[in-house]
Structure formats: C-alpha cells, structure tokens
Image (spheres, rainbow, N blue to C red):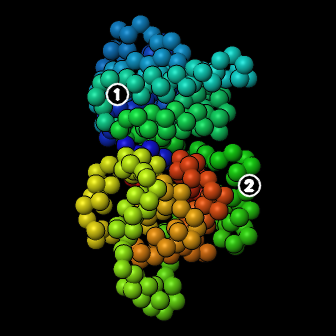
Amino acid sequence: MPLTLIRGDITTLKVDAIVNAANESLLGGGGVDGAIHRAAGPQLLQECRTLGGCKTGQAKITKGYNLPADYVIHTVGPIWRGGGHGEEELLISCYKNSLELAREKGLESIAFPLISAGVYGYPKQDAMEIALGVIEGFLEEHDMDVYMVFFDSELIIPSESEYEQILSYLKEHRVYEGPLASERVLREASLEGSSLSDYVKDKEMGFTPKLFELIEQRGLEDVEVYKRANVDRKLFSKIRNNPQYSPSKPTVLAFAIALHLTLEETEDLLQRAGYALSSANTFDLILRYFIEKKNYNIYEINEALFSFHQSLLGF
C-alpha cells in the first residue's frame, strides 16, 4: 500500500510491473525507454510490435521477459510545450491509466520513473507534484505498493519556496550540510541521564495503547490512519495485535503525522516508544518544521526528506 521514493535503476526492481516512459511507437528509444528494452531483451520489442503503438496519455502492458519485473506498463508522456497544450491533463492520464491497468491485472506492486521529466522537458517539480497527487488519490481507494524511482544523479526538491524555508530552518539549528550530503544514520536521541527510561517506566500506558487511544479520541477508522501514515496494512495489524510492539522512530513519527499531533503530543508519543527528537538531527528537524507548520501531508514530508537524503516515513 505505501508510496516509496527510491534512487536506483528501475530495471533491477523485483516488482509486479515497472512503468516505461515510452514514445508513441512503443519500439524503444533513449533514456528509461532504451534501458528497459535493453534489459528485457528482444522479445519485448517483438511483443511491442503487435500493439499498434500507444497514444499520449494512454498505457499498454506487456510481459517483462528478462526483467525482474513480471510486466512492463508502457505509457507515453506529453512533450512539454510551455504548459498550454494539455500537458498536465495528459501527464495525469499517464499515471491514472498505468495504475488502473495494474489494478485490472491484479498486480500488487508497481514502479514508476518520473514521466516526461527527461528529454520531453516537463519541469521536474511540476511533474513530481502531478505524480504524487495522482498516486496519493489512488492509494486512498486501493491497496498497492507504489515506487517512484529516480536516477542517483537526479535532484528532486520540494517547491523552491518550501525548500528555501527548510534550508533556513536547518541553518538556524546549525545542522545543514547541503542537499547532496551523504545520508546520515538516524540517531536515537536520549534524554540526559536515566530520565528517558524513568519516564517510560513510570508511564502507565506504552506506545501501542496510547496510539490506539489517540485514534479512538479522534474518531478515525484504522484504514484512514494507516493510509495517512503511509504504513502497510499488515504492519498496522501487527501493531494493533501486540501491546508490546517496539516501533522504529520513523514509524512513530509517521503515526504522529497521520494523527495530526502537535509537537508536544509527538514528543510524548515518541517517549512512550523510547525515543526523543534531537535538535542536532536533520531528519528530526525536518519533522519539527512540518509539525510546527501544521502541514501533515506525508507525501510532501517524504519528498522533503528524500531531497535531503534522509530516511522516509511509513512503510
């Protein structure tokens, strides 16, 4: 069910289907299209020759052949011509039609490149916003593991104003090392001395009971919570059935975002799981930034975390 952003080679992913940003002929090309055809082998081209091409915004499916993925969903993105020629609607259709084709086929996982953002010239941030918007809407209604895959060299950042605000926030707290800094290892910040362990021990209610108390207080259904948290249904069920479940720090924060907790409530939930927010940790500070702004869109938060090479929320 969750949406995951990853850097890497889409042709190496073991998923039910990968999406090919194809041209209308479906006979191969450059970029992702060429890489997929090379990895799949000549049988992919042979099958594509039988499909009669594909119109911009539409999608067609083939076998994966030599790819780890079972299928390839071919979709044709629009060429950017300034934004006044229906490019947005066509790009939305690419994602919608690909997801619907996967759903009709009964697939459980799918991986997308950022469609039209290469040689077709679609502005990357606009393309990213469209992709996230369509996928978010789809996942509200359906369960599927969806991946957005970026080349290692691709720099995907939030909107310029948001990015600058995050930079300013990080600089104020003296932790910024640049958007391309090496990914940091998350540190589990602790309170001085034994105060954290004492706090947890003295609490009558641990993380799991408190989580479900908060869910009940807010009148939310389970499905609404785990989808807001970008958490897999199976993981959510495991947490519900185990009062002593020990979550990771990102999982706790994912639920804090899903429940729209204040900063104080977030820190309380973290402490019940044995964690605390640190002012010396980029991951923690980005979460603080969004919570203080009362922006609880987990996809936007993960996009920001991804741009700073941080671990993401959920899953």
Element class at badge 2: helix
Q: How many marks?
A: 2
Residue 168 rendering spot, x and y as whole percentages: 74, 62
Residue at 33% across, 55% down: 236
Q: Quadrant of residue 171?
A: bottom right
On screen, residue 230 versus residue 120, left or right, reads: left
From what the image shows, is residue 138 above or below residue 241? above
Residue at 53% across, 62% down: 261
**Farthest-out residue, bottom:** 193
From what the image shows, is residue 195 above or below residue 68? below
Q: Which residue is mark 2?
A: 164
Give how far apart the Cα atoms at labels 2 and 1 are: 38 Å
Q: Can residue 180 be seen from the camera position used here?
A: no
On screen, residue 92 versus residue 100, left or right, reads: right
Instruction: For the N terminus, give its image quadrant.
Output: top left
Q: Which residue is mark 1?
A: 103
Question: In front here: 17 or 93?
Answer: 93
Q: Quadrant of residue 275?
A: bottom left
**Farthest-out residue, left:** 241
Question: In front here: 134 or 256?
Answer: 256
Amino acid at pointer 2:
Glu
Q: Quadrant of residue 262?
A: bottom right
Amino acid at pointer 1:
Arg
Element class at badge 1: helix
